[in-house]
Amino acid sequence: MKKQTKLVAVLSTAALLAIGASMTSFAATGWAEEDGTWVYYDRNGDKVTDKWAKSGNNWYYLDSNGEMAVDQLIEDGDNYYYVDVNGVMAANQWVAIDNEDAGDDDEPEAYWYYFQANGKAMKNTTNKVALKTINGKKYTFDDEGKMLYGWVNDQNEHQDNTDGDAFKSADYYFGDENDGAMTTGWLLTDVTYSEATEDNYKFIGAAFNDDEDQSRWFYFKSNGKKVKNTNDDNTLKGKTINGKKYAFDDNGAMVAEWSIDTVWASANTASRNNAKYSQQWKYFNSVEDGSRVTKGWFKVVAAEYLDLDRYNDDEDAWYYADGSGNIYAGEFKTIKGKKYAFRKDGRMVDGLKFINDDFDVVKADNDDMPFDTEDDFLQYAPEWVDKDYKLYYFGDSSDGAMKTGKTNINLDGDSFNFYLEKSGSTKGAGYNGEKDSKLYLAGMMLKAGSDDKYQVAKKLDTGVWTKIDGAEKFAEESIVDQLDVTQDNLDELGINKKAKDIKELYKVAESNNYKLINTSGKIVDKSGKSKDGNDFVYVTKGENIVAIYVEK
């Protein structure tokens, strides 16, 4: 367009000198030069005014004084024309005409017009955008023929962008004042977006919440209209572009990173640590890209309104989006044959965790009832089980896949054998009870320490088993009575020892709630004697512990 204008508006000295030569060739009854200008007389000898006159292939305009107009816009009836410095009517060309209001807010230095083959300026007399195609590009004009530019609304009105917020009320973008071609596809432009700094926008696009002066992406369809949400409810408008998913807010600005429909969010913010709330969040990559993560893993820092603590700590985590872009939250999910768990805030669970049916996740080093050491595990695991929590193990933070079957788990630097359910509704949960002549507490196989050689396992009222720390502790149990060391008592207990060789003697009441286990975790199920590492000897009949004694 600029190149075309130079050809029209810049007149050489040679061209100016040629005007006189051209006009003097006119018939004496027609054109005449008077006082440095040209006039035209009709056959009656009257000076022609307010009319067009033709000479050769060119048209000229005689103004109200009968003088040939030069370098000006001509309003003739409902139409607008332009005559150049030679007085020749412009046709099939762009012309820039100085704007007398230049310098005022949002006023250009000049307005562009396009004059058709008949000399008439293209214009629009409707109250909507009426596109005109010129040299393969689309433009729109006002009712005076001025090319509209910048942000334009659906009523074909240029939107004042002095404050940088014209995008809010506009539907189209037609380039700058010297271009004006309708924009299609992507546009990155600077805007002033005061509403984006409000708290409510942290749901829609928290990535743009820090500063009202922003650079934002917009997308314009083939008809020039920008993509935006039209429901007037602060939801998001989804759009697939070149096979990728994007979302746009009420004003057509592309969202990025975390986003959620505010209507849904505002109705569920009473408890943000809620799986249904978290499942509505979507992730749209960076502010430079913005394409939605659709069905796949991504590792990012949480949104402020998704997980405030993780957001403040700038701590990233793994998330998984389903085919609709919503993240998994508060649930187990099988992904490519592996099972994973996701917290209520959507973070992938890793490591050793207790989880209940409401999907409250407890980490091993929690402050109240930790289970990250063997002693803590034996003490607090029964309490977690009693609270209807199940233990799971999900590998480390780079994997997160649920482990099943026999698994070695590290606690405080030591490796322990666990058994995790292989199938069914409790797949992955730590086994409680007896299996293959071994006892398990929340999946941990109970076994005697290498120094102890033998230890007693106790069945709690809740039905789970735990380990008693040594024979002396076992002797304090209610079913154990200390006896005088007499030969009669030894004989009664079936202990083939002399009383003079025994220092301490304990009788154990018959009970199936106590089992003796060895260093491999196997339940001692034979009749005989088993000496631990502290000189206590357990006397068993089958799986029953009947007595304990200590030799001198």
Image (cartoon, rainbow, N blue to C red):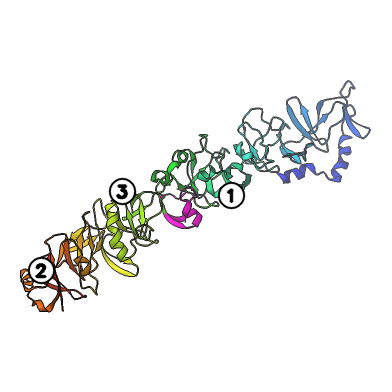
- Which image quarter is the N terminus in? top right
State the SS at label 3: loop
- Mark 1–mark 2 Cα distance, whole angstroms, equals 73 Å
Percent coordinates x, y for residue 191 in the rendering: 63, 45
Q: Which of marks 3 and 2 is nearer the N terminus?
A: 3
- Residue 221, relative to residue 377: is it above or below? above
Residue 436 visible, this orientation: no
Q: Within the magenta stretch, is there residue 292?
A: yes
Q: Mark 3 points at which residue?
A: 357
Q: Looking at the image, which is closer to me, 343 or 245?
A: 343
Evaluate if marks 3 and 2 touch, with contact meaning CB atoms under 8 Å apart: no
Image quadrant where residue 483 sits? bottom left
Q: Looking at the image, which is closer to me, 26 or 248?
A: 248
Q: Mark 2 points at which residue?
A: 526
**Residue range corresponding to the magenta coloring:** 290-318
What's the amino acid at mark 2?
A: Lys
- Residue 510, relative to residue 46: is it above or below? below
Q: Which of marks 1 and 3 is nearer the N terminus?
A: 1
Single out the mark in the foreground, 3 or 2.
2
Evaluate if marks 1 and 3 touch, with contact meaning CB atoms under 8 Å apart: no
Q: Name the residue under label 1.
A: 210
